[in-house]
Image: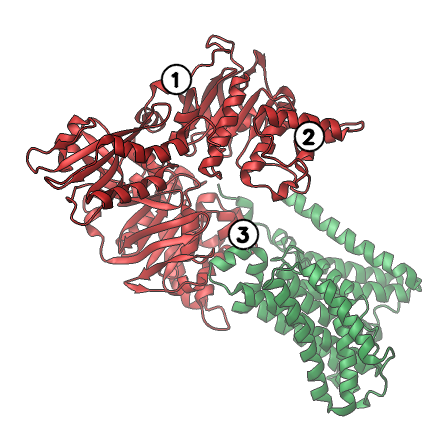
Chain colours: A green, B red
Amino acid sequence: MSDASVNRPAGIRRLARSLEVRMLGLALLIAVGLSLLSPYFLTQNNIFNILDQSVVIGIVAVGMTFVILTGGIDLSVGSVAGLTGIILGLALRDLPIPVAILAAVASGAFIGLVSGVLVAFFGLAPFVVTLGMMAIGRSLAYIFSGQTAISGIPDALSGIVYTTVLGIPANVIFLLLLYLAAWSYLTYTKGGRTIYAVGSNREAARAAGLNVLAYSILPYVISGALAAVAITFSIAQILSADPLAGNQMELDAIAAVVIGGASLAGGRGSIIGTLIGVLIMVMIRNGLNLLGVSPFWQGSAIGSIIILALLAERLFNWRSTH
Amino acid sequence: MSNPLFPADAPPALVARSVSKRFGSTQALSDASLEVRPGEVHGLLGANGAGKSSLSRIICGHVARDGGELLYRGAPLSPRSTREALDCGIALVAQETCLAPDLTVLENIFLPELGRAGRLSFPDLRRRATAILARLGREQALPLDAEVRSLSAAQRQLVEIAKALALNADLMIFDEPTASLSPAEVQHLFDIIGRLRDAGHALIFVSHRLEEVFSITDRVTILREGRTVAASLETARLTQADIIRHMVGRELGAIYATPGLDRAVAAGAPVLEVSNLSARPLVRDVSFTVRKGEILGIGGLIGAGRSEAMEAIFAMRPRDGGSIRLNGREIAIRRPIDAIRQGIGFVAEDRRAQNIVPDLSVRENLMLAHLGRHRGFGLGYRSRQARVARLLSELGLPPDRMDASLLTFSGGMQQKVIIARWLLIDPEVLILDEPTKGVDIGTRSAIYRILRDIADQGVAVVIISSDFEELLGVTERVVVMSDGMTIADLPTSILTEEKLTLLAAPRTSTRQNRALLETLARDYNAFAWWALLEDQALICLGAAEAQGAPPLNLRAGEARRNTETGIPAALAARDETIRTEPESGLRTLMVALRNARGHDLGWLGLTVAPGKALPDAARIRALTRDWQTDTHAEGDAA
């Protein structure tokens, strides 16, 4: 009746049972491999590079984790980033920087709210709703921008990226604080646990009195808002808002969440796993650049690693359940 | 009713001998035997879980048997798939049809042929389909080009039957075929079954509707706990009581926590009162009351709407009528959390689908209702820690496995955790739907003891169970539901499994009969009643009382000795003349109700005060003929 192996696994086996640990192992493996292949990889400069490149995708991946935990998906993050970037660029013409950022983030949250209500209240398929939102967002980005990039962004905005605290750039600090906050929320609050419960068994969550509707909508709001936050950091670096910005960002974000061990069926996954997933993605891209691999091959490399990671995971689970 | 074309000594179409089947820890069949002749409708009967469905599914290749022997037309049969059984000529017409909803009727009838190589000739298929429907006498009932999606349940069933005939099925199993049909549609179906019998098909009719069994079957085989306890009895020689005796008849086990003599007395004030609850289509009129410290059972057959009624109370499904009162105050429950805040807990029937959150740990599963009720940003787990520790030791749960997945626990342990989830919020009312389903016998008795304990602590407990033995062993009172209505509310002490089975059997005629009783009571200022008579006792199935009518000691859903009723003389005489009680002078007229095949449906009685007028028997019989023909005549009414 009782499963003894669950009762007292050896220390190592217990660790290996945690998916984050396995993925961290994979990340280290990639790091070691790349540092052997390229002497430049492990330099301080390049490590900061990797962290810097992780910021935008990392922020979007947090929102995507929330959505995927409820069993949904948000395909619109790239377009929402593009659209809110344009809104930010336009707002910066007349408004002070904090107000402009707030306006962009609020528009992102509003788009997420619309998607969330359509999914959770009207019961439409998340895939279809956010696919529609993706098309609408990109189209509005072109219309609002007049089909060209908006330049003339005030230099002061770049402060949110290039200010350093103890030698660490502000955008990296923001990323780490965001992950800490998201992890605490998902682990230690009623809302966070409700998101897991909703994704794992919606019916049981409802029967236990949890607010299934609210916590099915909230992740889309967070995802939309964080897409705007992410594009703000991106614009602060290049000081230009492009209507095409954020193109295919949703694919990278979903890939990072999935590599981080989340189940697309919902209920399973973690914010730490997502961070590891983001780092794996960025390291691979960075390493391939260092090795001078053609950018056209990078898609194949990243795609293969995603599939191989999931395959290895499936085989591991087969072994442990059979 | 024997079929002249296929004499009784014809070789059987199907013989099953000592078939056994185990699903996990449940022995579904241990010694099931069945013999079906061509040209007969053979009833396969049994209580919930007796193995009717398992046996049908084995015969039609849906599942494989573990042991025993099947012979089909004298040759051994071991279908490995439904397809193989179909190729042999065995088809199942189930409650849930397995048709392709987007294809047309014609395509569905010939679905098995669509997969074959070669070209199909649609004009030819159309001709064959028309011929099949003509054989069934239903040419007009099915538009061949309609999409199956748009059809009614009865039409879909007809498509299933036509599909089986297109494959020349000789043996057809009808598994609860009338569950979703209206009375008129039932008549059409019986007409079709009659035609198939006359054409020499062997038909197995699985049902727990005794009235239907009496009106359509030639012989019956009765299963109990996976064994055949009565084989091939002729229906014409049976009474309802005979069948029920075979379906039940066994000793109560000793696994129940015996509460002692005071159990009926201990119950306190009403806590939860549900009146006229309705959640169509499955819940039509449900009323019951449960008192402090009492264990109330909700009995009935699968499909009677019991789970649906409880889900409606808990706002898990939309309600369209009725009121719920808690401690005398009407409460509005729009979402489950409203019920939880009022102190109502609900262990839903399907553990895996409705209760367990698989990705959360045992601890969090245990805390889930607490979390739902908790107001605040954090988790508030700490405040419950002491209570959790106490619950774990009370329920015998291992405190060191709180971080494991609940799925690694046995079914019984999972159920204990789910029950603990609700005990943690200190409910006033705890509703449990099939709390011991899939639970091993040891844990079952532990769960009974837990329920007894919490009732003794003052919780009002409601248990739904299809296991009548369990209901009788655990509860103080049983409310019986049938066809979405509560039809009886009886103290457990006067109940037996036989009576429960009889009360729970859905009666196509219940509603019409209620209306008739009310009309009669009003028209004659009488006490009108409908009852099944035994030698010295009766079971009242319905009663209606006009103002000024004599107050007989009869209540729907209750059993009485004849001497307790107030009209013993009439009951003893039981003829269709007006009888006057020697002591009280009450005047009673009783009319025997029989269906078209002469089966006993009980008696209808009218009792009036001394000296008041009564109609004659013929008048009442004329009134009752309507529903008797409607639901029981064999011919096609249309």
Dot 2 alpha-carbon crowd within 10 angstroms: few under 14, some 14 to 19, many 20 or more: many
Q: Which of the two discs, 2 and 1, labels the residue nearer the N terminus?
A: 2
Q: Work out whether mark 3 precedes mark 2 in sequence or the reverse, and give the earlier one.
A: 2
Three-letter amino acid code at the position of disc 1: Glu
Return the residue nearer the eye: A84 or B221: B221
Between the C-alphas of marks 1 and 3, the distance is: 53 Å
Above or below — where is B257 with respect to B189? Answer: below
Kind of residue at badge 2: Phe
Q: Residue at x 68, y 70 (%)?
A: A223
**Where A276 falls versus A231 (above or below)?**
above
Identify residue for label 3: B405
Which residue in the structure is indicated by mark 1? B234
Q: Chain of mark 2?
A: B
Q: Single out the mark in the foreground, 3 or 2.
A: 2
Q: Residue furthest left?
A: B583
User: Which is more foreground, mark 1 or mark 3?
Assistant: 1
Could you tell me the amino acid type at mark 3?
Answer: Ser
Left or right: B322 with respect to B534?
A: right
Residue B13 horizontal/vertical position (percent): 54, 15
Identify the residue at image location x=8%, y=37%. Answer: B585
Q: Residue furthest top?
A: B9
Q: Quadrant of the C terminus of chain A?
A: top right
Residue A234 makes an appearance in the image: yes
Task: Name the subunit of mark 3.
Answer: B
Q: Is residue B267 left or right of residue B337?
A: left
Question: Which of marks 3 and 1 precedes in the sequence?
Answer: 1
Residue under numbered circle 2: B110
